[in-house]
Amino acid sequence: MIRHASTASIWGFALALALALAGTPAESAEPPAEPAVSYADLADLADRAPVVLRAQVRKVAAVEPERAPGLRPGWARIYVEAQTQALLAGPAQTGSALRYLADVPLDAKGKAPRLTRRSVLLFARPVVERPGELQLVAPDAQLAWGPATEQRVRAILGELLAADAAPRVHKVREAIHVPGTLAGEGETQLFLETAGDQPATISVVHKPGEAARWSASFSEVLDTAGTPPPRETLAWYRLACFLPDGLDAGVNVSATAEDRAQAEADYAMVRAELGECPRARG
């Protein structure tokens, strides 16, 4: 059966529990509502998941806390058997009968959410040579299904799978400000380090008598006439959620102290306009 990286020791137990199921964990009387997750929460999960699907839970069994290493206080670990309802992303041979482990939050009475016959969204990877077994990309990568949540996930998957998808951003590799010939004229370029060394650049353009404007480019062609990426898009997520608060030492290679100060100020402006990257998941 599937396992989280830190829960290998519980799988023999989970199998025995599934074969000799004495009951299900105490469940809340209320079904789980659509999760209050942010765009970044969903993008975090979708970006790591080779398989994303909607499934209906058929059986649930609690894993004893002492057999659930790394379990957060106020949470329960469960063994789940489910049936695929819709494959949102991943190989068609994922299968219909599924088995996996998941962590779920307990309510104020210490009860797990009522999941049997409920639909859930799963972000997972298949277990090699174990058909039907899934490993969630995070212990809490099972979300209560709702039409609005699924719509948001489908939109994110569409962005991730697009040919021109913005790559994962690691850090700012180099920053340089070059002044123009006129007072108040100049341009700052921020070259980003990305997964696979794919191109990614932020440009800040200064023109006399105008407010500075910036844009991001994820191709070999720099688009200094572009606009900042809208919030809750993949390009915004790559920048807002992963760029550092300030430039690292040695990154700013502008020629003079004044130019270096301008590059720092331009980077601060970009970070401020990108805004925070809110996440609701722990």
Image (spheres, rainbow, N blue to C red):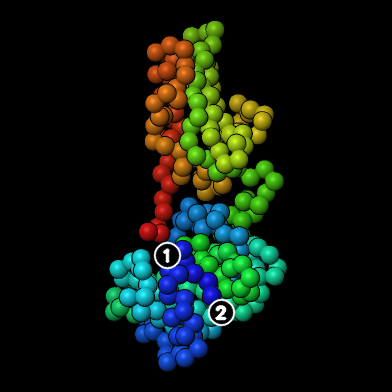
The reply to whether discs 2 and 1 touch (Cβ–Cβ < 8 Å) is no
Q: Nearer the viewer, residue 79 or 225?
A: 79
Q: What is the number of the mark on residue 93?
A: none
Query: What residue is pinned by disc 2?
Result: 82
Q: CA distance from mark 2 to mark 1?
A: 22 Å
Figure quadrant of residue 265 = top left
Name the spot of residue 134 as percent of width and height, x first: 56, 70
Helix, strand or loop for disc 2: strand
- Quarter of the figure that contains the N terminus: bottom right
Q: Position of residue 247 (x, y in %)?
A: 41, 29
In this view of the protein, can residue 9 be seen by the observer?
A: yes
Q: Amino acid at mark 2?
A: Ala
Classify 115 as above or below 222. Answer: below
Please name whichever residue, 91 or 37, is drawn nearer the observer in this view of the structure.
91
Amino acid type, mark 1: Ser
Q: Secondary structure at mark 1?
A: loop
- Residue at image point 39% right, 18% down: 261
Q: Residues within 10 Å of mark 1 (few under 14, many from 20)?
A: few
Q: Nearer the viewer, mark 2 or mark 1?
A: 1
